[in-house]
Image (cartoon, grey):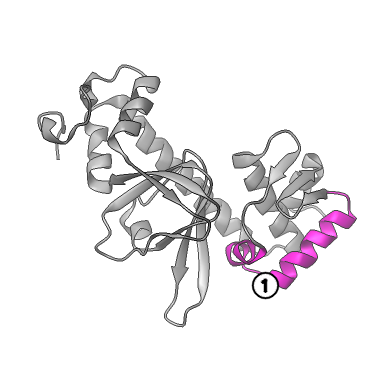
Amino acid sequence: MGCLCSDTRGWREENLPCDLRDEEETQRFLQRQGDRRVAAADAIISTGGTTERRCFRVMEGVARVVLVDVEGRRQVVRFAFPRDYFGLSRGERELTAEAVSHAALLEFDAGRRQGLSKCNPHLARQVATAMRSNLGQAMEHVVLLGRKTPRQKLAGFLRMLHRHLGLGDVVPVPMPRTDIADYVGLTPETVSRAFADLRQRKVVNFFDRHLLRVDLPALVTIADGGT
């Protein structure tokens, strides 16, 4: 598939992809091209499957991509945070996508969105950055599922949340304990005990169930294998 600009029927507004000159114009262009969607907490965004052709970009809130096996067991494969894409790869489009919290999204045809990369370097850079981010989170997930203690797994997870959602030493935790457990390969009960352990060590302090204050240096030390 070559540049899509020759087919102007699908473009909204006056700008064509080839005309985009900087990142700000690129952002405005994509917001016009995507279909806006709003999903309530725990709502299904996509049921997945081999016929799914859509990809999404999170503008507000958090989404989760979930693998459900034949026996109904769930594994949270990844979380998508604001500005993240999900569904760019065929394998990810086959999985179920759900809103963790109230979420605002842009919906695209995945093939067309990736085809835009051939039109403009700014659009190509966005897709490349998104794919690198997805790969980085996948590698981080593999590490979390490895031979670590529950405390270390939870610390690694909270470090990831801080990177995407944190402000100073405050970390929002929008997902329930069951999501965290499904992501790091523990039971919800073990996750709760790991939270209590970190709290006793004064590594985390709860404002409420979904908002923490963290001792970031101590959290990083534990996430990297310390005690």
4 displayed left or right of 134: left
- Which image quadrant: the C terminus? bottom right
| Percent position of residue 56, x then y | 37, 47
Residue 47: percent from left, percent from top: 36, 64
Locate residue 18 relative to residue 43 in the image: left or right. left
Task: Say which of 197 and 107 sits in front.
Answer: 107
Instruction: Answer whether residue 83 is visible to the viewer in this image.
Output: yes
Establish if 131 lies above or below 15.
Answer: below
Q: Position of residue 126 (x, y in %)?
A: 38, 33
Helix, strand or loop under label 1: loop
Q: Residue at x 70, y 43 (%)?
A: 171
Residue drawn at (26%, 54%), measured in percent from left and top? 53
Between 8 and 183, the one lying in front of the other is: 8
Mark 1 surroundings within 10 Å by alpha-carbon count, few (fewer than 14), some (14 through 19), many (20 or more): some
Residue 149 seen:
no
Check the image and name the residue furthest to the top: 21
- Residue 2 magenta-highlighted: no
* Residue at the outermost bottom position: 71
- Residue visible at 30% across and 32% down in the picture: 32
Asked if 11 appears above or below 44 in the picture, the reply is above
Splitting the image into 4 quarters, where does residue 200 fall? bottom right
Q: Which residues are magenta?
A: 177-203
Q: In which quadrant of the rendered image does the N terminus lie? A: top left
Q: Position of residue 100 (x, y in %)?
A: 54, 56
Instruction: Determine the residue positioned at 47% across, 38% down.
Output: 83
Q: Amino acid at mark 1?
A: Thr
* Residue 180 drawn in magenta: yes
Residue holding disc 1: 187
User: In this picture, is 209 found above or below 32?
Assistant: below
* Count of marks, rendered view: 1
Residue 127 location, quadrant: top left
Prevailing secondary structure of the magenta residues = helix
